[in-house]
Amino acid sequence: MNVNDKTGSAAWTANPERYATMRYRPAGASGLRLPAVSLGLWHNFGFVDDLYTARAILRKAFDLGVVHWDAANNYGPPYGSAEQNLGLLLRSDFAAHRDELVIATKAGFDMWPGPYGVGGSRKYLVASLDQSLKRLGLEYVDVFYHHRPDPDTPLEESLGALRDVIRQGKALYAGVSNYDPALTRQAIRFFREEKVPFVLHQARYSLLERNVEAGLLDALVEGGVGCIAFSPLAQGMLTNRYLEGIPPDSRAAKPFGYLREETVQERLPVVRALAAIAADRGQTLAEMALSWLLTRPAVCSVLVGASSPEQLAENVRALDAAPFSEDELSRIDAALGR
Ligand code: NDP
């Protein structure tokens, strides 16, 4: 199928100035440089979503120099559909730009029925990447992640599968996600011995979620691995989205996904306090949340989601932020009760 059957005219020319303002930061000690703001396809790119909007978001991303796009086998819903839509759009709009893009995917959470469709076995990871490449219509992905540790599989088996798909040319770089500090250190040792380019750890990190500060960031700095921070806006809570209630088109109002209205309500007092600090800095809350993360050790990129091109453009404006003063950092800590 051609995407234009679904989304109308293909008329679009990429912005020739797309690299003028974005900053590119090395993933750890590697030569891979990522845009300071990257785009994730967990939400808003499935068959349940509007393909016109998905295309508009990707075009905006590309035009802003946001050239790293992050997928996973089971993003949708339904599972696989975000990769399928991305594949359609890569063919229709970005075929001439493949080498300007860093495309990532992952496997680890449940994908298909039975014991070989989940976890960390070699059987699952290799088959899943083959399926992802078909959906994406690509010969290789730039980054392939083990999406989560699997306590029922020896670590060497999961990491060995990543090593081998890289040696086969199906992926260029290895990554892990949701690994704790101890496992991460083991992964650093394994990949170093095997001479595999292990460049990224994808971890949940935001003003509201700071577990990575208890050892993970140190391990990454020491190991020369970049942290790419996922859900940096706490799924939208660290924006102005919920300040006046729960909008009907917001993630918290949707029947699928993991952001609950009660969580949004619980966090609202803290979010309002943070929004006030952002306003004093002349920023939106989203801009402040992202610019704060970009000052943290090991963090090379913030991996945002967006349900519109405008949201993404706002998030990229985080790069225009003034440095934080000591007073502002203390006010942020106080708002967070730290
Ligand atoms: P964010 O924290 O950036 O939340 C994105 C959501 O916040 C958007 O969909 C939108 O929600 C809202 N939003 C974003 N920008 C704005 C703005 N400027 N103003 C108002 N609202 C805004 O990230 P996600 O939770 O989406 O995660 C990002 C990516 O991280 C994923 O796509 C995925 O690639 C990766 N990820 C990885 C995981 C892992 O285990 N490795 C787990 C989770 C995510 P709304 O729909 O309400 O408009």
Image: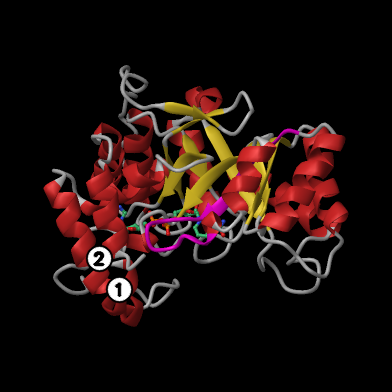
Which is nearer the eye, 204 or 17? 204
- At horizontal 24% and vertical 43% (from top left) the residue drawn is 314
> Magenta region: which residues?
197-211
The quarter in which the C terminus is drawn is bottom left
- Can residue 314 be seen here? The reply is yes
Q: Look at label 2 and name its amino acid.
A: Val
Q: Residue 32 carries which label?
A: none
Q: Which mark is residue 271?
A: 2
- At horizontal 59% and vertical 61% (from top left) the residue drawn is 74
Label 1 close to label 2 by CB (< 8 Å): yes
Task: Describe the element under mark 2 as helix, strand or loop.
Answer: helix
Residue 282: x, y in percent?
A: 13, 43
Tell me: residue 45, above or below residue 101.
Answer: below
**Gap in Å between the C-alphas at discs 1 and 2?**
6 Å
Residue furthest to the bottom in view is 262
Give the side of residue 284 with respect to residue 150, left or right: left
Q: How crowded is mark 2: few (under 14 residues within 10 Å), some or many (20 or more)?
A: many
Q: Mark 1 points at which residue?
A: 267
Which is nearer the eye, 242 or 204? 204
- At horizontal 54% and vertical 56% (from top left) the residue drawn is 212
Residue 251: x, y in percent?
A: 33, 68
Residue 135: x, y in percent?
A: 61, 48
Within the displayed image, which quadrant is ligand 1 positioned in? Answer: bottom left
Count up the numbered dots.
2
Give the side of residue 16 with respect to residue 36, left or right: left
